[in-house]
Amino acid sequence: MILKQDLHIHTHCSCDSASAQIVDVLKAGQQLGFTHFGISDHLHTRFNLPDIEVARKEFLALGPVPGFHFGLEITCVTQWECEKIAKRDYASCFTYDLKGHPFQTMTPIDGIMYGGPANGPLLLDITAEEIERLGIEYIIGGVHKPNYTEQAPRSMINDFFNQMCFMLNHEFVDIIAHPWDGLPFWSGYKILSQDPKDLNFEAYRMIPSEYWDELAKLFIDNHKLAELNAASILNARFPEDIRHLYMNEMAAWREKGVKFTYGSDLHAAQYDTALTMRFNGLLQNYGFTKKDFYLPPLLKDIIKKKDELCN
Ligand SMILES: [Zn+2]
Ligand SMILES: [Zn+2]
């Protein structure tokens, strides 16, 4: 088994459909023989902070366990939505005219999907004090929605690229979650139709090679890690040839010196061992070995301290 870690696992404390109990994640990680694994629930904006507080409490109740970590998956958000959420100004965000359809953001739980100014200032809605207080050991930064740009492939590619660059230059981020994931969703209007046919996987072919190159450079220069995400890459809707294109780009990043982490991105009640095993096989097909997987540098210091505590 190449995979000796899984740093991207959601629990019932996540604001979405995830449902695993933290103790079950712990048992599964130990059974699989992971050297390091961690929970990483979503924080889109500080609206989700109470969920992370609960996760932290439950995590601590299990005591210090060597190799078991407390991470966070943070979304790249906008100043515009954070200001609205800080003011608890939700009423004006409930309904948005999306191609003549009223689109409802039921609560700001996922951030505010529509209505902001395109390409406004980005941010991560957490402070250094909160990271310290919550004992967050590493942060995975993810693009989960556009910065209010046009929902079409080219503008979406530029938007995702800008957000990834922002996070690659941000001191809080250790790992970039599932690079480019969400592009097929936001390049089309599945959000309206709910029809999987409206996922535009062809958008992956339109990513300019300079963007792949520039991201690789930022990963290396800024000592950030790229995530290989099983849930995203083994998505059953992913056309085989485009999955191949994506994995070739990941292998090309590796050859340039990019370092990786593994994330199953679990959202179910039980750990999906079969998915991780399948993904392990896929990685081998593209020449990945144990040596390509790393831990964030800051996490290594925490591990040292934790090991001292456990011994
Ligand atoms: Zn994500
Ligand atoms: Zn996730």
Image (tube, helix red, strand yellow):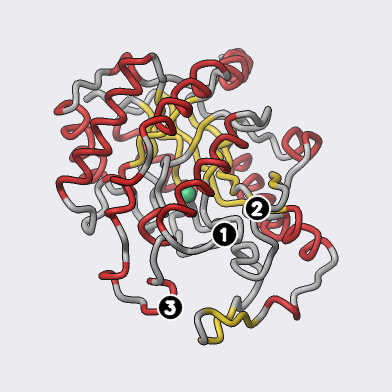
x and y percentages locating residue 150 in the rendered image: 52, 63
Question: Which residue sits at x=31%, y=60%?
Answer: 200
- Give, as a three-letter code, the residue at label 1: Thr
**Marks 2 and 3, how far apart in space?**
23 Å
| Nearest to viewer (mark 1 / mark 3) | 1
Question: Mark 2 and 1 residues: CB-CB less than 8 Å, in contact?
Answer: yes
x and y percentages locating residue 126 in the rendered image: 74, 44
x and y percentages locating residue 136 in the rendered image: 65, 35
Mark 2 closeness class: few <14, some 14–19, many ≥20 residues within 10 Å? some
Mark 1 closeness class: few <14, some 14–19, many ≥20 residues within 10 Å? some
Question: Which residue sits at x=50%, y=46%?
Answer: 158
Of callouts 2 and 1, which one flags the residue occurring earlier in the amino acid sequence? 2
Residue 310 seen anywhere in this rendered image of the structure? no
Residue at the spot of label 1 = 149
Residue 268 seen anywhere in this rendered image of the structure? yes
Residue 108, above or below 297: below
Horizontally, is 311 left or right of 277 in the view?
right
- Give, as a three-letter code, the residue at label 2: Asn
**Marks 2 and 1, how far apart in space?**
7 Å
Residue at the spot of label 3 = 192
Residue 99, above or below 224: below
Residue at the spot of label 2 = 119
Q: Nearer the viewer, residue 296 or 306?
A: 296
